[in-house]
Amino acid sequence: PSDARVADLERIKWNELKQSWGKSAADWNHVRRALSAFLTVLIGDKFSPFRRRIIQAIPTANEVGSVGSGNSGRSFPEILAGAEEDDPGGWLRASWVCRVR
């Protein structure tokens, strides 16, 4: 959503989002790592209580083999079209599956 804030990351039900992820475990773990790095840079402190709450709330996925991203040929707008306006987890999922190859 256009009014999303970093603080909204605390509202995401990370366990539910992981269950509905639909992509590889590696993709999920990439999101977790990227979000960790983003929050560290934004806040300027990797030990920030806010950052630690968010990262601790995000479960890791067990990576077994490689399955690819499953988004070949799909553009960023096409993927975002599948995200619902009132679902911050959906927007996060849609934006992170678009990795540059």
Image (cartoon, grey):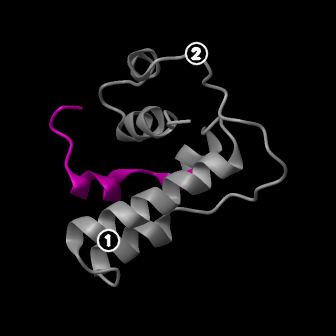
Q: Residues in magenta? A: 1-15
Q: Please state if 19 lies on the left or on the right of 46 as rendered.
A: right
Residue 24 is situated, as x and y percent measured from the top left of the image, at 70, 42
Outermost residue toward the front?
A: 101
Point 78% across, 38% down: residue: 67
Outermost residue toward the right?
A: 65
Point 33% across, 59% down: residue: 10
User: In this picture, is 89 found above or below 75?
Assistant: below
Q: Residues within 10 Å of mark 2 (few under 14, many from 20)?
A: few
Point 53% across, 45% down: residue: 17
Residue marked by disc 1: 40
Secondary structure, mark 2, is loop
Point 68% across, 58% down: residue: 61
Residue 13 is situated, as x and y percent measured from the top left of the image, at 46, 51
Chain-order first, disc 2 or disc 1: 1
Outermost residue toward the bottom?
A: 47
User: Is 7 in the magenta?
Assistant: yes
Which quadrant is the N terminus positioned in?
Answer: top left
User: In this picture, is 72 found above or below 65?
Assistant: above
User: In this picture, is 4 found above or below 26?
Assistant: above
User: Is 93 in the magenta?
Assistant: no
Secondary structure, mark 1, is helix
Residue 52 is situated, as x and y percent measured from the top left of the image, at 39, 76
User: In this picture, is 1 found above or below 44?
Assistant: above
Q: Amino acid at mark 2?
A: Gly
Q: Amino acid at mark 1?
A: Thr
Camera-side mark, 2 or 1: 2
Find residue 66 and report its image quarter. Answer: top right
Q: Please give the label number shown on residue 73.
A: 2
Of residues 37 and 12, which is closer to you in this image? Answer: 37
